[in-house]
Image: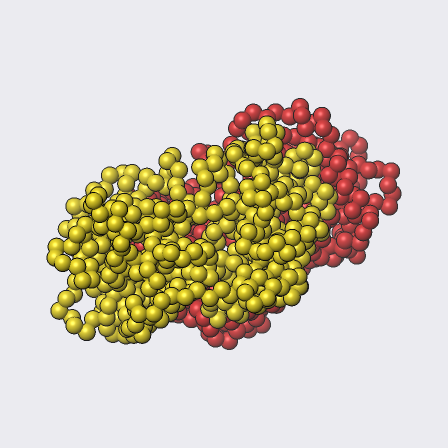
Chain colours: A red, B yellow
């Protein structure tokens, strides 16, 4: 313990005052640079410093499995918490308290946690440039590329460098908006707890506005049409949870406006829930039909704009419907992922690695090996990041070598030659595999193998579907499995106690519907 | 039930389309007018319509006690929830989840709830003009007068009228800032759950910023000085809860910055906790001294301004300290109350009541009887609002008469000739008394009598003080009483279950410190 504390103190005190004061401090850019030196070479007993970028399923899962007795663990993430994403749709409608989906990274007892974005990585010097994040509103930056006009881009946080011995890149992905007009500005996302809070407030606000005596029937119809774009598990589960909130709770409180309520899921594909087989997908569609949730497949959204007549409402232009726009009180967007800007930046770099195993000196210039289709970082089956020669004549050479001590897991990386979906399950298994290999000192020996635990989606009305290699389940039995699985996967004991309590309380007393 | 639903439907449909469309709709002011007519005179069996303004201790307490079989209950409040204020300081540091301090007014099963501000009252026509509130950020308007430049004042919500048979004014009070420069703009208040959330985020942000390797020691000292202005129970309890958060939880997570932490309570009076006798106040000061919380009495704050060098920090100018300013990461303001602007507006009105009991026709012009010192509305011992003749020659006449069917309770009203503090206890007892009198049909017969249940304040470190007419308690025994009393007074069964669970969870696992 004493050793760990010492390293920590050194980290804090290693910022040279000169670097601090010579930094540019003009009014818009708050960027300042300071270097955190750590070579610390004379200490032979020093534990290897493992820096983890990200606190999602991959980063958080890795950090909690890596043995603190063997490694110094340093995490860099814009969020000081891990979000248990499968429960987000539930919190967005008040079935659960927001905080029950969070695990504070500070509780992991890390040697150091820097709340900030990895802005760049120097693979030669083995340092990471970090931009500190001490703002409150993270949602706009953590999973959505800022628009050019957004204020967020102009304000940069304090900058400092963090050195690593081993690096685990688990920065995840951003939300894909396909450049569709108005999505970034007007749609709601469902990837962080702040998003869930915004959705919850807006849904309750729509009901509150619709119930006002001065609201016209036409406005009520606009306010109470809830549009979900994207028919994957997140979109479907949100529609299902919203249906439960309305049927179980809001129906009693706003009986007079119920006739104006509508939920519609839009998707460009010919069928929703592509990861489920036809029988289960059909069951889901039949369940939705009975619940009154409309599913519109092969519908292409081309624009979202604010409604000039009804404040807060939106107008959706859909290719298949011609000039007529669809009105909605809220649009929840859940269509897909795009690469993290850090990954894009890294893939453009040409560099000399500090050391390539088995290579002659000086090391030739390389660039990161990336997947041509998705832009993801490519790793080998040991999850090492791979590089390819940078020179033109060698560019056709498909042979890649590994970048020593650098690993990539989670949504930002795929294993060369394997097709695994960008899911929590894959991220979680890769994280656990890598940490265990490092703990045992056997990294680079055994291949990573994905074990499919099956896929589950909640459909509302205490019904779910579950598909796995062993067998398929649907209806109430799948719902029990869905709840139980989430419970056992929920990470801390605190949340293992709190989540069932919230479920029980919501079941007995109804969901809390205070707009706060 | 069918009858109640019918009334409800009528309310919603009684908005004439003509009134709606002829209303002004220029871009800044969104104000629109619509009248909700309800004379409904031919229905002899119709229940009397009691309109309640406010959802605090007085309004919420009254509404839940009034018999729905005998009266139609309509509530108008900018907040859709009641806040259990004694627990706010605890939620501000994460001992409790925010929502555990809230009770949704919609769960009261009211005949109607309008989320909005009472903008004006026509005592002649017996109608209330309501400005709808469907925004999310309530904090800035519900308890703080907006500054002239604030955007909030320009944006008016939809307007509509609500008629009443009986009216209960329980609009509460606003925060007193004594016109001190920068208080409204830069201080944090602790009156609503949104305030508690802001404080919580800011405190955690201060620690996060202080822990950055690039932060100087001087900046750390600024960030980690927490200033509380006002030595009443709210200010003292917040300082105590903050001390617990820092000692129990943050100390482990940020050991290196602990030496920069300081908490100071400032008050203009020569002693804090004026409602406690000297022995208990001394015990409180001794406890604070041991906990390292500084208390500076007879200190007059004259200005708060942002620190130009350290973003987010504040500089406090204090008369007694001359030109030297005090640095703080946050200022929590809890000094006193001022009149609600609706009360001020009503007190300026001259009107003819629709009927004054026993008066000749036509009714003479009157104005509301107000307390010269505090500006509060004056009531008789039956809590009826009182009026005085408006004409000059009669102004010297001190005799007042009652305004029939209009009552005032809570912080906005005092009983003529009685000195009762503006506390939750008084508000709650008045509410309960008035509702019971109306339920029994005995309003105007028995006088209201206040029973002092004693006063309690938490001091941190599992210690509290309790003072009542029977006996005084201090230390751990008072702490047990403090927790138990809050528990039994906490209103819904839901929160009676949740509050001890949160306390237990925080005790076992520590407070949640995710910045969300």
Image quadrant where one finds the N terminus of chain B: bottom left
Q: Is residue A280 left or right of residue B382?
A: right
Q: Give the residue displayed 74% in from the left and 57% down from the top.
A: A436
Q: Is residue B254 left or right of residue A245?
A: right
Q: How many marks?
A: 0
Q: Give the residue displayed 54% in from the left and 60% down from the top.
A: B455
Vertically, is A84 above or below B180?
Answer: below
**One can see residue B80 in this view:** no
Image x and y of residue A182, in percent:
38, 42
Q: Give the residue displayed 67% in from the left and 57% down from the top.
A: B461
Which one is nearer the viewer's eye here, B326 or B220? Answer: B326
**One can see residue B19 in this view:** yes
Vertically, is A471 above or below B306?
Answer: below
Image x and y of residue A383, in percent:
68, 50
Vertically, is A472 above or below A435?
Answer: below
Q: Is residue B414 left or right of residue A412?
A: left
Q: Give the residue displayed 33% in from the left and 64% down from the top.
A: B382
């Amino acid at each position: 313990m004493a050793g760990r504390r010492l390293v920590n103190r050194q980290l804090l005190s290693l910022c040279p005052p000169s670097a601090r004061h010579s930094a540019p401090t003009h009014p818009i850019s708050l960027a300042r640079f300071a270097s955190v030196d750590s070579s610390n070479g004379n200490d032979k007993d020093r534990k290897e410093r493992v820096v983890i970028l990200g606190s999602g399923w991959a980063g958080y899962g890795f950090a909690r499995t890596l043995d603190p007795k063997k490694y110094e663990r340093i995490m860099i993430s814009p969020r000081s918490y891990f979000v248990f994403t499968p429960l987000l749709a539930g919190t967005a409608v008040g079935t659960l308290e927001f905080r029950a989906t969070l695990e504070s990274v500070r509780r992991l007892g890390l040697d150091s946690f820097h709340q900030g974005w990895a802005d760049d990585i120097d693979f030669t010097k083995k340092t990471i440039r970090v931009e500190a994040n001490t703002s409150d509103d993270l949602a706009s930056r953590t999973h959505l590329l800022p628009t050019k006009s957004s204020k967020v881009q102009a304000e940069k946080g304090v900058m400092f460098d963090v050195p690593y011995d081993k690096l685990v890149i688990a920065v995840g992905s951003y939300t894909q908006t396909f450049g569709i007009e108005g999505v970034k500005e007007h749609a709601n996302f469902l990837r962080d707890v702040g998003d869930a809070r915004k959705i919850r407030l807006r849904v309750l606000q729509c009901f509150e506005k619709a119930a006002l005596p001065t609201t016209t029937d036409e406005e009520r119809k606009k306010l109470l049409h809830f549009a979900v774009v994207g028919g994957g598990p997140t979109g479907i589960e949100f529609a299902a949870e919203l249906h439960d909130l309305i049927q179980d709770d809001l129906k009693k409180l706003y009986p007079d406006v119920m006739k104006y309520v509508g939920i519609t899921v839009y998707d460009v594909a010919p069928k929703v829930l592509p990861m489920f087989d036809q029988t289960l997908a059909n069951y889901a569609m039949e369940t939705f039909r009975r619940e009154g949730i409309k599913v519109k497949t092969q519908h292409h959204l081309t624009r979202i704009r604010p409604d000039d007549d009804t404040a807060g409402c939106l107008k959706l232009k859909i290719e298949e419907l011609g000039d007529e726009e669809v009105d909605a009180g809220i649009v929840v967007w859940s269509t897909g992922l795009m690469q993290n800007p850090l990954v894009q930046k890294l893939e453009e770099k040409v560099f000399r690695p500090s050391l390539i195993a088995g290579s002659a000196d000086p090391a030739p210039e390389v660039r990161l090996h990336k997947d041509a289709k998705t832009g993801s970082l490519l790793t080998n089956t040991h999850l090492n990041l791979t590089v390819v020669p940078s020179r033109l004549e060698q560019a056709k050479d498909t042979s890649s070598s590994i970048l020593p001590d650098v690993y990539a897991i989670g949504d930002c990386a795929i294993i060369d030659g394997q097709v695994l979906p960008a899911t929590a399950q894959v991220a979680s298994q890769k994280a656990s595999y890598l940490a265990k290999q490092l703990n045992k000192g056997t990294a680079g020996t055994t291949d990573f193998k994905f074990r499919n635990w099956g896929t589950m989606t909640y459909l509302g009305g205490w019904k779910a579907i579950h598909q796995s290699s062993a067998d398929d389940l649907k209806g109430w039995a799948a719902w029990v499995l869905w709840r139980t699985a989430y419970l056992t996967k929920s990470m801390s004991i605190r949340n293992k106690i709190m989540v069932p309590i919230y479920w029980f309380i919501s079941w007995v007393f109804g969901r809390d519907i205070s707009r706060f």
